Image: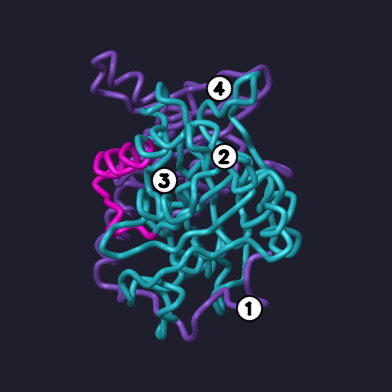
Amino acid sequence: MAFINYSSREIQLKIVYYGAALCGKTTNLVTLHKQITHAQKGELVSLATDADRTLFFDFLSLNTKTLPGFTTRFQLYTVPGQAIYNTTRQLVLKGVDGIVFVVDSHWDRMADNVESFANLQENLIENHLSLVQIPYVLQYNKRDIPNAAPINYLEFTFNNRANRAIAFEAMASEGTGVLETLNAAARLLLAKYSKSPNANVTGLSQPNAATVVPPPAEEAGHAA
Amino acid sequence: MAIEQQLADFLAKSEAQWSALVDKGGNLFAQYGDTGTLDLSILSALAAGSFAATHELAKRLGESEFSALYHEGQGQHILMSALHHECLLVTIFGEKTNIGLVRFYAQQVTGALNGLLQLAREKESQVGPLILDGDFLNGPAAIS
């Protein structure tokens, strides 16, 4: 739930990166921490095991001046992807405002992706929430691997709800598509504070019209 | 008394170093005192996470009553006390005081803070939604 402090003119919004184990959630935050230079960013905190697997969450805070007259603080969290940490995922989802669901494009990981998407919906219900109320964007990550599943397959599998979400192709380890994904999620969250929200931004005004945003041209060539 | 004033009063009485009102999602609502150069949003996120994990552990052990959590360090200690409306009071204190004193005054301020949170909750339902001009984060305004 967004927290608005009228006296200090500050809005805090929580975005959670969700997805199967090893799909690239932490890599998204690491890359954002490197790439973001203009917004005021905090330290990247990782509660991880010795083998760099997320144990509790990763956390990155960004202060922006995106709303007139307010400081908007985006608090980015990841969840641990491994199946055993489900209770932890439920805890991290507490008070969530928006979600980035990261899909691993590798064919062999499809079952894990599907299971994680179902698990997200279950855990939202545990927190008395659902994907109908919580804005979310999809990120098809690891587009550069040789046996990546085709985009139309991923769209059919993860984006066939009545209101289609905005989806991004990404290569998080190389930094492609990561900022775009975050900005889309942030725009979705902020749209509800706008007198005239941009229909293209919310993506919800035209069911089945949302498109997958490909990576920038030079990277697209590299992916092929 | 406003929330910051309650916290200031609590710090003066307990001689603790820093105190904050944080929600269980990790948002920092109000704070008072001195933590030096520490990043307060990180502190809040970790405190909320730590409290949530311990609370869940207690629940699984069949402990229904779980109102406070205390971490003892060598020089600095942390006390976290549960408040109503999904909030926490986080207090950091050093050698100037002791856990007994901090816990005693924390229990006192908890009642006052719960009252203020209840008032804020009632007021929230009367305040209209925040609506501003423009659509945001387009073009050069994007996060970069």
**What's under tag 2, amino acid-wise?**
Asn
Q: Which residue is mark 1?
A: B139
**Same chain for the residues under marks 2 and 4 in the image:** no
Q: Is residue B29 visible?
A: no
Asked if the residues shown at circle 4 and circle 3 are in contact, with their CB atoms under 8 angstroms apart, the answer is: no
Q: Which residues are magenta?
A: A116-135
Q: Which residue is mark 2?
A: A147
Between the C-alphas of marks 2 and 4, the distance is 60 Å
Q: Secondary structure at mark 2?
A: loop
Quadrant position of the N terminus of chain B in the picture:
bottom left
Tell me which label, 3 or 1, sits earlier in the chain.
3
Between the C-alphas of marks 1 and 2, the distance is 34 Å
**What's under tag 4, amino acid-wise?**
Asn
Relative to B22, residue B120 above or below: below
Q: Secondary structure at mark 4?
A: loop
Tell me which label, 1 or 4, sits earlier in the chain.
4
Between the C-alphas of marks 4 and 3, the distance is 25 Å
Asked if the residues shown at circle 1 and circle 4 are in contact, with their CB atoms under 8 angstroms apart, the answer is: no
Q: Residue at x 25, y 72 (%)?
A: B126
**Same chain for the residues under marks 3 and 1 in the image:** yes
Near mark 3 (Cα within 10 A), the count class, few <14, some 14-19 or many ≥20, is: many
Tell me which label, 4 or 3, sits earlier in the chain.
3
Instruction: Using the rendered view, name the quadrant where residue B43 is placed.
Output: top right
**What's under tag 1, amino acid-wise?**
Gly
| Label at residue B98 | 4
